[in-house]
Amino acid sequence: MSVLIPSPTALNLKRYPETRDQSLQAWSAADELILSWLKDNTLASHLRILVINDQFGALSVCLNNYQGQYWTDSYLSAQAITKNQKNNLQAPVNFNRLSLTLNKNNEQIPNFSNPPEHPFDIVILRVPKHNSLLKYQLEQIKPLITKETIIVAAGMAKEIHKKNLQIFENSIGPTTTSLAVKKARLIFSQYKNTQPQPWPIKSFNLSDEKLEIYGLPGVFSRDKLDIGAKVLIQHLPELNAGDTAIDLGCGNGVIGAILAQRFPQTPVYLTDESCLAIESARLTFSKNALSNGHFYVTDVLENVPLSSASHVLCNPPFHQQNVQTLSIANKMFKQSALMLCSEGELRVVANRHLPYANMLKNYFKSVSSLSKDSKFTVWLAKNPTRFK
């Protein structure tokens, strides 16, 4: 017996963080296409479904009449899914989060904290931005599927290309694609390549700092120092006894690791919304024998057990998935101002064209530039406005 699959347009789905931009919705044509395909194939109600990379909950909420789990690396996406489940579903909620952490003994072995009792019948995957994350996810799900499992991926046509199709071929098996509908396409793979394949952990050396920086799949600039971080490193603060520093949106932990090594008595807090980014930062600290790091997967500074800080450093993202946005940077600036002590400082590196100066002035009395070149500006914000 098939079950009802509502359309995203019939629900009250919202993006998270919420935005005032009415042109941005919490689902895409790729979500609509995969839901339409599922409806057309009248899937039986007993089938178990795994949804990977659901951005804001459109898939998990619309498929709640099935039993299933969702897996996302993103704390923001998990928050969006939970909020949209609460706002749109009557009990029971049939989709819960599948949690996967880095195995401490062998990084190549998946470590699921709540694996399903039986293999999934269907895997639905939104194609991620980074090919390394795609390969990692396809390899990690192998213990959870069988050769009978239906594997369907969706993405906008511009996101689907020869390289990621080849990853499906190599990791899963024979792969085909659908025709484009509203600039979205589906990918179908038959699971035949059951032998696990390694997914490499990348690293690069900072010779001046005598540090090796490690990056797991999908983490920004995991195999080389990004140019924004390179600029910010030239303007790191001197830390004094009693100071506390925060590497906000830490990625692989390069900024936090440099501070931790230069000032080993200073507590360094590293936060990111990506689970794999925080695992990368942990690995960077562990491999370099740095013991003064504290790590949090969270939205900016939410639930970080710290009453105040002396220094916050960040390179704010200005995209969420593939959409440009200033809302994440604005939240970083606002929460930094609330966390910093009266003499505290926020240092921000950003593409020169971004309008961060006026945004920072909403939360800080003093905003100046430490550095400007043709690409980047390093902003110094002091004296949070919450202090009279």
Image (cartoon, rainbow, N blue to C red):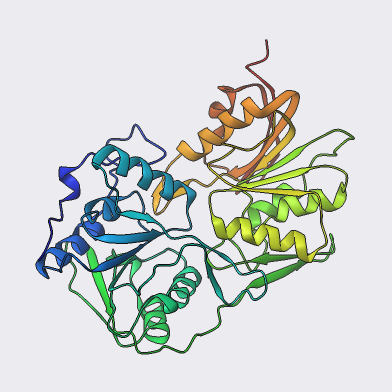
Q: Position of residue 197 (x, y in %)?
A: 51, 85
User: Could you tell me which quadrant the C terminus lies in?
Assistant: top right
Report the front residue among 184 and 1.
1
Residue 186 position in % (x across, y down): 24, 70
Tally of numbered tags: 0
Question: In this orientation, which residue lies closer to the viewer: 148 or 213?
Answer: 148
Residue lying at the far top in this picture: please name it. 388
**Where does the N terminus fall, quadrant-wise?**
bottom left
**Residue depicted at x 84% and y 42%:** 266
The residue shown at (26%, 50%) is 61
Q: Is residue 120 left or right of residue 204?
A: left
Look at the picture and state if 124 lies above or below 244: below
At which x and y percent is residue 133? 48, 68
Left or right, 58 with reference to 130: left
The image shows residue 339, relative to residue 283, as above or below, that is above
Closer to us: 310 or 307: 307
